[in-house]
Image: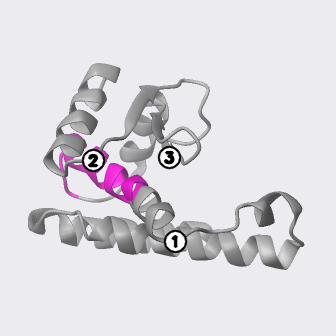
């Protein structure tokens, strides 16, 4: 099991390696393993959800590398919001179709932009996680 301090160390080292100034914090109320909040420029993670998520993955990598892969995807959200100024009001006030389209675009962009940060040795595992995620979303 990875504890809060293990995950914080992975996040801290990864942010430092890529010269990214993003806050991070543990949040055990979070309903997903890890997320990025654009309003607060903060990565939040639930270490219990992370451990549960990586336990379900059928990818041959260390727990630490799987956390890195999850983190790279979350960093993809950061890069997407930095490069594209999405009208997030759509998520609150748009019709069902607009909301679905914007969420799909943001999700796809997160994977694409996140991949640009992934080290060569983790690209295959990142691709596998992307494929698993697409299946889970259906």
In front here: 103 or 70?
A: 103
Q: Earlier in the sequence, mark 1 or mark 2?
A: 2
Q: Which residue is mark 1?
A: 84
Task: Relative to 121, say whether 18 is above or below.
Answer: above
Which is more toward the observer, 87 or 92?
87
Q: Say the numbered circle drawn on residue 36.
A: 3
Percent x, y of residue 100: 74, 73
Label 1, residues with CA under 10 Å away: few <14, some 14-19, many ≥20: few
Q: CA distance from mark 3 to mark 2?
A: 13 Å
Any part of residue 138 in sight: no
Q: Is residue 14 left or right of residue 93?
A: left
Q: Position of residue 117 (x, y in %)?
A: 23, 63
Q: How is the image coloured?
A: one colour
Of marks 1 and 3, which one's residue comes earlier in the chain? 3
Give the main secondary structure, helix, strand or loop, of the magenta stretch: helix
Screen quadrant of the C terminus: bottom right
Q: Which residue is mark 2?
A: 20
For the record, the magenta segment spans: 60-75
Residue occupying image coordinates x 47% and y 73%: 109
Sequence-wise first label, 3 or 2: 2
Is residue 71 one of those drawn in magenta? yes
Tell me the crowding category of disc 2: few under 14, some 14 to 19, or many 20 or more residues within 10 angstroms, Cα based.
few
The question of residue 48 being in magenta is answered with no
For label 1, the SS is loop
Q: Is 50 rendered above or below residue 66?
A: above
CB contact under 8 Å: marks 1 and 2: no
Q: Nearer the viewer, residue 31 or 62?
A: 31
The picture quadrant where one finds residue 88 is: bottom right
């Amino acid at each position: 099991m990875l504890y809060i301090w293990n995950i914080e160390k992975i996040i801290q080292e990864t942010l430092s390696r890529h010269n990214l100034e993003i806050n991070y914090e543990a949040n055990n109320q979070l309903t997903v393993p890890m997320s990025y909040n654009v309003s607060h420029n903060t990565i939040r993670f639930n270490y219990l959800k992370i451990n549960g998520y990586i336990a379900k993955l059928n990818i041959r990598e260390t727990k630490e590398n799987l956390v890195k892969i999850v983190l790279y995807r979350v960093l993809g959200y950061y890069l997407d919001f930095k490069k594209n100024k999405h009208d997030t009001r759509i998520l609150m006030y748009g019709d069902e179709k607009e909301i679905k389209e914007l969420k799909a675009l943001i999700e796809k962009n997160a994977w694409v932009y996140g991949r640009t940060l992934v080290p060569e040795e983790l690209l295959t595992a990142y691709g596998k996680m992307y494929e698993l995620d697409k299946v889970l979303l259906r």
